[in-house]
Image: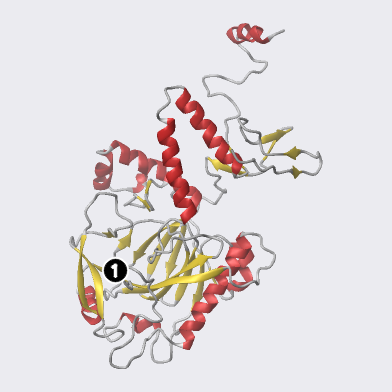
């Protein structure tokens, strides 16, 4: 087994020294007097920072570059610029039939007109059929059908071997011109990349926050959706900036630490309804109550639904920074004229992460993360060959070994369960008798 690294932390007032625990010893919170000091991060259960019970709305800053130390590592809404393409193409007319004219696009046509979620391949529940069919059609036909009330969604791709790039993928066959390939849009992309670098540096407590080259652009993806359509809540393994060009979106986000409460399968949270269990109407209550596991999942989600949510409404020209691993649920909001929602996602690679070189869509696990998950599966299979109580005993020791290698700890209850009160001066006669067994 590799040598466990040792970490020392000196605290003022008492000179308390903390070191990573030796093999077999549980790393946990340490106490000094009545105060509980945390010297490193808790691996399990996730350490959720306290938040207000009110759902926070992500603010819009006129000069977000001045605020990066405060918001590093969290989603952040930035910019409000209606004309960050050239003078002839503004954000408002990206949803027009003339924007990309007769350019052929591949569209997800949702089969059930009453459906709200788009069951994309990477988001839907494993081994379940998709709720759409693929159709190729001209851009103008797609816009026209959306305005007529059809449920359509498109995420542009550049084939199975090359990442999407809006700056090169949308050339008009007649004019040989790409509406995104303008100095203004290039400048906006450079500016947002600089912001992602600064967020990343601030999150790492890097003093050299002006250093460049910590992230590189992976892809830029054009998305179009009908009003009222929603993508399942999911996480991406890369930081990204969501540029809202036309229409309005609502984005609900949860930090990576919220994963245990989100009923996650693969990269998606199996939570179709977001209002919370207690706010559902009778029809939804009946649907959920018929499935014991589903009901449990929604009650579990209710524990964090409001106090842990970040909610953002994007207007045309706004942009939202979504950090890697943050769960987000994106809904295109209805409009009186049934206008489509048009947006561009720009994904970024961090230079200190080894990504899958064949990941053109930007949603595969990093190489080391994938390998670690595979080893965890193999480890579980190995432990499962042991009889009880060896199986659970060594499983706990393996979890603690992982925590110690990461210089983290597992939170262990300070006392026995309520049925076994802590030993103190209020023993009942039975406890006093039991205590005698420990006396010398």
The number of numbered badges drawn on the structure is 1
Q: Residue at x 61, y 73 (%)?
A: 212
Decide: is 27 above or below 10.
Answer: above
- Position of 257 with respect to 111 (left or right) is right
Q: Secondary structure at mark 1?
A: loop
Q: Quadrant of residue 427?
A: top right
- Position of 208 with respect to 390 (left or right) is right
Q: Residue at x 50, y 64 (%)?
A: 58
Disc 1 crowd, CA 10 A, few/some/many (<14, 14-19, 20+):
many
Q: Quadrant of residue 132?
A: bottom left
Quadrant position of the N terminus in the picture = top right
Q: Residue at x 32, y 68 (%)?
A: 160
Q: Nearer the viewer, residue 53 or 248?
A: 248
Decide: is 353 above or below 26.
Answer: below
Horizontal and vertical percent position of residue 372? 47, 47
Quadrant position of the C terminus in the picture = top right
Q: Nearer the viewer, residue 433 or 315?
A: 433
Q: Nearer the viewer, residue 108 or 297?
A: 108
Horizontal and vertical percent position of residue 262? 41, 47
Q: Nearer the viewer, residue 100 or 266?
A: 266
Most distant residue in the front direction: 1
Most distant residue in the bottom direction: 175
Q: Quadrant of residue 316?
A: bottom left
What residue is disc 1 on? Answer: 227
Decide: is 272 above or below 411.
Answer: below
Asked whether the viewer can see residue 17, the reply is yes
Horizontal and vertical percent position of residue 203? 61, 60
Q: Residue at x 81, y 38 (%)?
A: 14
Horizontal and vertical percent position of residue 90? 40, 86
Asked whether the viewer can see residue 306, the reply is no
The image's colour scheme reads secondary structure
- Position of 389 with respect to 133 (left or right) is right
């Amino acid at each position: 087994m590799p040598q466990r690294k040792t970490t020392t932390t000196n605290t003022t007032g008492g000179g308390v020294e903390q070191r990573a625990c030796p093999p077999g010893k549980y790393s946990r919170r340490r106490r000094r007097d009545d105060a509980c000091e945390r010297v490193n991060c808790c691996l399990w259960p996730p350490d959720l920072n306290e938040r207000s019970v009110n759902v926070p709305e992500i603010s819009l800053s006129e000069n977000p570059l001045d605020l990066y130390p405060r918001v590093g590592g969290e989603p952040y809404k930035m910019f409000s610029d209606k004309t960050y393409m050239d003078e002839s193409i503004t954000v408002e007319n990206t949803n027009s039939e003339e924007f990309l004219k007769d350019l052929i696009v591949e569209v997800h046509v949702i089969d059930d007109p009453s459906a709200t979620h788009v069951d994309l391949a990477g988001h839907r529940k494993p081994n379940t059929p998709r709720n759409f069919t693929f159709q190729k059609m001209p851009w103008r036909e797609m816009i026209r059908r959306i305005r007529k009330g059809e449920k359509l969604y498109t995420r542009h791709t550049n084939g199975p071997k090359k990442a999407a790039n809006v700056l090169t993928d949308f050339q008009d066959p007649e004019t040989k011109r790409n509406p995104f390939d303008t100095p203004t849009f290039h400048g906006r992309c450079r500016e947002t990349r600089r912001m992602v670098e600064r967020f990343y540096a601030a999150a790492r407590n890097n003093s050299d926050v002006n250093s460049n080259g910590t992230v590189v652009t992976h892809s830029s993806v054009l998305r179009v959706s009908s009003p009222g359509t929603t993508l399942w809540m999911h996480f991406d393994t890369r930081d990204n900036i969501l540029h809202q060009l036309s229409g309005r979106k609502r984005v609900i986000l949860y930090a990576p630490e919220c994963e245990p409460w989100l009923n996650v399968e693969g990269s998606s949270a199996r939570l179709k309804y977001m209002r919370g269990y207690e706010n559902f109407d009778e029809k939804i209550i009946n649907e959920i109550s018929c499935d014991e596991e589903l009901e449990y999942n929604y009650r579990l989600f209710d524990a964090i639904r409001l106090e842990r949510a970040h909610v953002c409404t994007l207007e045309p020209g706004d942009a939202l920074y979504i950090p890697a691993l943050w769960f987000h649920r994106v809904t295109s909001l209805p409009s009186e004229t049934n206008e489509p929602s048009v947006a561009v996602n720009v994904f970024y690679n961090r230079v200190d992460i080894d990504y899958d070189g064949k990941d053109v869509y930007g949603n595969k696990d990093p190489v080391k993360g994938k390998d670690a998950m595979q080893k965890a599966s193999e480890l579980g299979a190995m432990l499962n060959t042991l009889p009880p109580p060896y199986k659970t005993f060594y499983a706990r020791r393996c979890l603690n070994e992982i925590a110690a290698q990461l210089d983290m700890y597992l939170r262990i209850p300070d006392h026995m369960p309520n049925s076994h009160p802590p030993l103190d001066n209020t023993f009942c006669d039975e406890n006093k008798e039991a205590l005698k067994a420990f006396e010398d």
